[in-house]
Amino acid sequence: MKIESIERIWVDLPLKEVPWRNMVREIPHWSLFELCKVTLSNGVVGVGETMPYYTWGEVTDEAVERVNGQHPASVMWDDSLGAGLQMALFDAVAKSLDAPVWALLGQKVRSFAHIGWWAIDMPVEDWICECTEAIEQGYTTFKTKARPWFDLEDQVARLSAAVPNHFKLDMDFNDFGLDPAIARPLCKRLERFEKVAIWESPIAQEDVEGNRTLRHHLSVPIAHHIDRPAFETQIRRDICDGFVMEGGISNALGRGRTCAEFNKPFWLQWVGSNLAATFCLHIQAALSHARWPAIHCNHMYADQFVDEPWVVSNGLSAIPDKPGIGVTVNWDTVEKYRIEAKDKPYPYPGLLLRLDWPSGTKSWFTHAQQLWDAFSSGDLPAFVTGVNLTRVDDDGSADWSRLYKQACVSPVHEP
Ligand SMILES: [Mg+2]
């Protein structure tokens, strides 16, 4: 058995309206996928996917050349192949063995995997829309972004009041809490909302002592992205309660088993369409401590190119037992959304964002990276009560054009 051919196909999969109108500020490129179609000499076809502008590992021409003609099982454990190629090889090898992917990864430890809903930062009305849909679809947890350009306390209060008691919230700060002096009192105040279940990266992850201090003052568990600082430091210094796991299969299995040794739960974060989400279920099947809800974001897409429906019930999704990943790629749908490879569409043109401060100051931006830079450096006041970000549509006025032009260069602040 050998790899006979590798075809790569780009698709642009539309996002649903609420995610799109908010992700356009920061990650409009999440609609782009590169499918990897691997055909083996036995006629079996395996398919994987990469999000070219988000992935933990892109598939390069060099990687494709390196494995072409090789036995797929001899190369599939190499994480440097990139997300889509590695996924396709596991799919093809498992199909050739008439076995599900999880059977290649280890002992199956569960039949149902924990799954969470995800959304980016957005006005609380949009968060409530997202959670309403999540609950209708059988989800019981919601991971989202804690951002200093919205009034976080007001958002959490209103969201908490809108969801049932069994529904839990994970607030990801991406380090925007900066240091314990900001994050500790803020998180302590927010902990009065009992639906908050996880703080993710509340301050700089590299601040070992700061994170240990937070763990001692807060009761809600703290999750960190794995490997920042070094995994060994994270474990030895016990700086968090659990992890966000990304990366290739060898990395996930190695790290995942170490987490089990140290009794650290984690969630797998494998973002993509229903194809990547279903693939991740197999990894969740093989790792005992993958018991925090996995983040796939597959629910954001308005359409899918695999035929099987994605089913979540009581926050759980069944591990597939069919050969390979266990899904059928619909090549007509792939054709419908097929595009030529393209550059990252960022910043998204024509976007003007206004930040209203309770002091009366107004700040203007054209994309979220400007907000990231200004707030993560501590240049702007963090988590101010009453602050609010809105999009300002082009009304054809000279004022809009002036602000847009200026803010394209750098943020504008008007007292
Ligand atoms: Mg995160």
Image: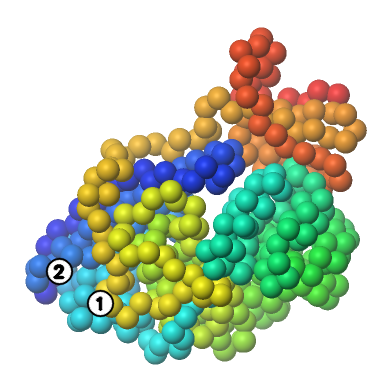
Q: Looking at the picture, which amino acid does disc 2 mark?
A: Val
- Residue 390's disc number: none
Residue 406 spot, x, y in % from top left? 66, 19
Q: Secondary structure at mark 1?
A: loop
Within 10 Å of disc 2 (Cα), the crowding (few <14, some 14-19, many 20+) is some
According to the picture, the residue beneath numbered tag 2 turns out to be 44
Residue 52 placement, left or right of 348: left
According to the picture, the residue beneath numbered tag 1 turns out to be 323
Which residue is located at x 56 percent, y 75 percent?
A: 314
Which residue is located at x 26 percent, y 64 percent?
A: 328
Q: Secondary structure at mark 2?
A: loop
Residue 43 placement, left or right of 175: left
Residue 17 spot, x, y in % from top left? 52, 42
Camera-side residue of 200 and 247? 200
Residue 15 spot, x, y in % from top left? 46, 45
Which residue is located at x 67 percent, y 59 percent?
A: 172
Residue at the far top: name it.
398
Within 10 Å of disc 1 (Cα), the crowding (few <14, some 14-19, many 20+) is many
Camera-side residue of 350 and 310? 310
In this picture, is 244 found above or below 60?
below
Residue 88 placement, left or right of 362: left
Camera-side residue of 29 and 369? 29
Camera-side residue of 415 and 15? 15
Which residue is located at x 57 percent, y 67 percent?
A: 139
> Mark 1 against mark 2, which lies toward the viewer?
1
